[in-house]
Amino acid sequence: MPCQTYRAFRNGPHYRQRAEKEENAIDFSVFRQFHAPLTANGFSIKYVMQGTERYRSAGSRYDVTTGMYLLTNAFWECEVTIDSATDVQGLCLDISPAILAEVMATHQTSAPPYPQQDYYDFLTSASFFEHCYPARHTATGQWLQQTVQRVDVHDFSDPLFAANYFYELAAIVLTDQQQIYNGLRVLASVKDSTRKDLMRRLMRGRDLIEDCYTEKLSVADIAREATMSEYYFIRLFKQVFGVSPYRHALNRRLEMAAKLLHDPTCSITHVAWKCGFSDPQAFSKSFRQHYALSPIQYAQQLQVLR
């Protein structure tokens, strides 16, 4: 059984150096001025609820702003700086390697096409892909946004609550990181630093798509955000994420449309316009190809299931 010990702190000490590397921890903090070296404890998520936390590590800078989180592991060392006229509120979650290993051993969703031990080694080694994510773009981030408002530090005095929380979080993180791990594996570059740089640039492009998929984005706009040529960006994006940038944006539009169709008061024309389609006919054609039902049939099926 993995170590089930748990520690929680409030008002800043999540930057305290701790010797216990094998425990789970959740640290709430409120700072206006702060600067210190930081060594991550275990697999670490640094989520900012309000303000900006700035991290510097090995010449790289990560500005974690409201609604973003930084994902690192125990091999990551940095300096953190907070300099604000108002309170900066943060949440740091450390997941023990033992919890990761146990959850991975029983993980049932979309296992990576590589040996499980290789995936675990990636998560717990110096090769891990440390990165700053907009919370709205990932399942991990959305889970953090949903739970942070309803979880109090005192809840973790209950060992059953604490265990459930960290097991659930570990499962979501593992699912999220599989695509990153798989993408890094398929990139042809030999150097680890080059693969990471390419992945970060691709993800900047994907973040732009995620934020603006209902708008008329051009490949030039997205490739510019990723600091790549258009052809190179399209080729690497499809290689890493399995679909072209166009298909990724279209899939997001169709997913949004499917959610809007749950509202019986929404007309097909309104849904098409809201999701960025040029006209209802183009929307209906794309929707049918994706869901094997027309928007009207899909909406009718929803009504029957209610």
Image (spheres, rainbow, N blue to C red):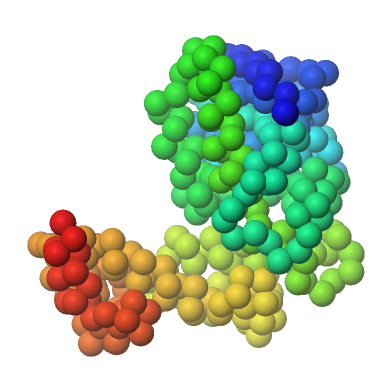
Q: Quadrant of the C terminus?
A: bottom left
Look at 36% across and 66% down and name the residue there.
255
For residue 108, above or below residue 170? below
Q: Position of residue 97 (x, y in %)?
A: 75, 35
The answer to whether one can see residue 51 in this image is no
The answer to whether one can see residue 73 in this image is yes
Look at 42% across and 72% down and name the residue there.
251
Q: Position of residue 270 (x, y in %)?
A: 18, 70
Residue nearest the viewer, comparing 59 with 257: 257
Taking the image as shown, residue 192 lies to the left or right of residue 111, namely right
For residue 65, above or below residue 136? above
Q: Position of residue 177 (x, y in %)?
A: 65, 53
The quarter of the displayed image where residue 39 is located: top right
For residue 197, above or below residue 269? above
Q: Position of residue 162 (x, y in %)?
A: 56, 23
Look at 52% across and 52% down and name the residue there.
138
Task: Identify the residue at the far right of this view.
Answer: 191
Look at 61% across and 23% down and name the residue there.
26
Taking the image as shown, residue 190 lies to the left or right of residue 21, namely right
Labels in figure, total: 0
Residue nearest the viewer, comparing 248 with 48: 248
Task: Identify the residue at the far left of this view.
Answer: 265
Q: Quadrant of the N terminus?
A: top right
